[in-house]
Amino acid sequence: MLSRFLSFLLLTCLFFSCNEAQKTDDTTYDLWIKNAKVIDGTGSESYRAHVLVLNDTIAKIEKDTTLEFLAQEQVDAAKKVLTPGFIDTHGHGDPIESPEFKNFLAMGVTTIALGQDGYSPREKDLSGWMQKVDSVNTGVNIAMFVGHNSIRQLSGVNYEEVPSEEGLAEMKSLLNNAFDAGVFGMTSGLEYNPGSFSKKEELEELAKVVGERDGLIMSHMRDEDDTEVEQSIRELLSQGKYCPVHVSHIKSVYGKGEERGNEILSLLDSARAKGVQVTADMYPYTASYTGIAIVFPDWAKKPHDFDEVVAKRKPELQEFLQNKIAQRNGPEATLIGSGEFAGKNLKEISEELNKPFEDVLIEDIGPYGASGAYFIMDETLQKTLVQSDLVNICSDGSPTMRHPRGYGSFVKVIETYVNDDRLFTLEEAVYKMTGLAAKTMGLQSRGLIQEGLKADLLLFDPAKVKATATFENPHQLAEGFDEVWVNGKRAVTNAQFSGERFGQMLRKQIPQE
């Protein structure tokens, strides 16, 4: 009799225990992503879990996958990985003219940082411009930086080498106004005009303002050539006494090899050891892309009169361009990306027009007549740089740029650095594209799969992602990111775009985004 009672008691306990294991909470969630292999953006090992979304937020992460929940929508993720949406710390594009940003969404990017290389909208009131962006709804979230070059132009300082007291005060005022509007920092483009005219004292005065406003300086440095890159880094590090600093698209033009890469990284590591908050980003291609003015001498660019230079100094300009292009791996290594010669390299154009390439540059293109891709980087050196713990991934791309990096960068990291070369585990690569990028920029509510953070999420099979864009056909969307959520809403379903836009204009707030 006693044994029967004990058996009954045991069965009763098991019944209630099992029911308790299946018990749900009382919330009806908007989205239940079931049994996902979660890579959370911290760099830690993946784990299996249910992820539940309510409104635009990750409301619950449950590692006990036997539990059941109520949700408006369920997605079976058992055979795929779930990661945070990727964050592009260096992007380009006009969110008012072209708000879709499908190229970014297709490669898993849900947040981009604009205002790069020293250029932001030519608006003294950036808050008004941001409100316009709010009104159009963008496909991705947008974090803004204010450009140093643009501040110089708007203040009237422009090409002055040393601003007057009044000019510097106006630049500081514009910088503060931009922070009031919600920018995350300032970018500089010291290889471009008018930023190239600025001196150390001016840059450090502005860095003090950036530091006071808890911002970041991202810099396209003064010179990325191998003989000058270390000095350019030191110039940026001097600003790091006052605020965090970030090397945009870190590279060494003409530099080669692992040893040279480690020498460059040692500058960053030494600065970090001394308390300077320095980081960098990089895109996974060995060709850069920028305006053709990069190959012209300063004395042939604004504010100088190009026609006058050609009239008076043409032989000197021809010789300069001959040497410059030879140094940059020859005319076949400069691929024109815009204008009437788009898609052809300088050698091909030269042969087509039956004239020397330097005359093509002077007579048919000019310093502001085109942009181009330049095959000037060493793959071994670049792979050395990208493995640094201080370097996150960016694209430096846009919807219109004739360079595959705007359509393939983040996919190429998985496809090449993870699947093929084994430079990183998938967890490490995702960290470089999410958590590290968010930390660098000061994005406090994105970049991780964590309860309470925004539901920017990707669901995909890492073995199936593919970068289809090439230099010949750069505007081909990446493949493999089957499901993309932006702020909790489906932007991509079964690799098809929803046709709706769910991004937001992000504004930096202290202490929260």
Image (cartoon, grey):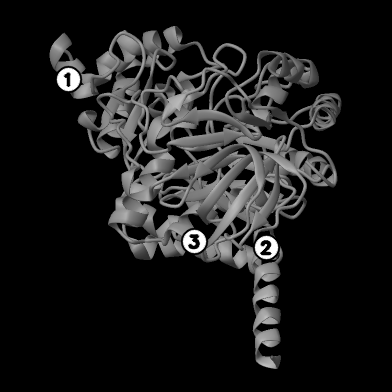
Residue count near mark 1 (Cα–Cα under 10 Å), binned few <14, some 14–19, many ≥20: some
Q: Amino acid at mark 1?
A: Glu
Q: Quadrant of residue 431?
A: bottom right
Q: Is residue 81 left or right of residue 374?
A: right
Gap in Å between the C-alphas at discs 2 and 1? 74 Å
Dot 3 falls on a residue whose secondary structure is loop
Identified at 44% across, 55% down, the residue is: 386
Q: Which residue is mark 2?
A: 19
Pinpoint residue 78: horizontal percent, then vertical percent: 45, 52
Q: Is residue 3 above or below residue 423?
A: below
Gap in Å between the C-alphas at discs 3 and 2? 49 Å
Residue 388 tag number: 3
Identified at 57% across, 24% down, the residue is: 139
Residue 348 tag number: 1
Q: Earlier in the sequence, mark 3 or mark 2?
A: 2
- In this view of the protein, can residue 484 be seen by the observer? yes
Q: Earlier in the sequence, mark 1 or mark 3?
A: 1
Q: Amino acid at mark 3?
A: Ser
Pinpoint residue 192: horizontal percent, then vertical percent: 54, 28
Residue count near mark 3 (Cα–Cα under 10 Å), binned few <14, some 14–19, many ≥20: some
Which residue reaches farthest bottom? 2
Q: Is residue 15 left or right of residue 215?
A: left
Identified at 23% across, 19% down, the residue is: 344
Gap in Å between the C-alphas at discs 1 and 3? 38 Å
Dot 2 falls on a residue whose secondary structure is helix
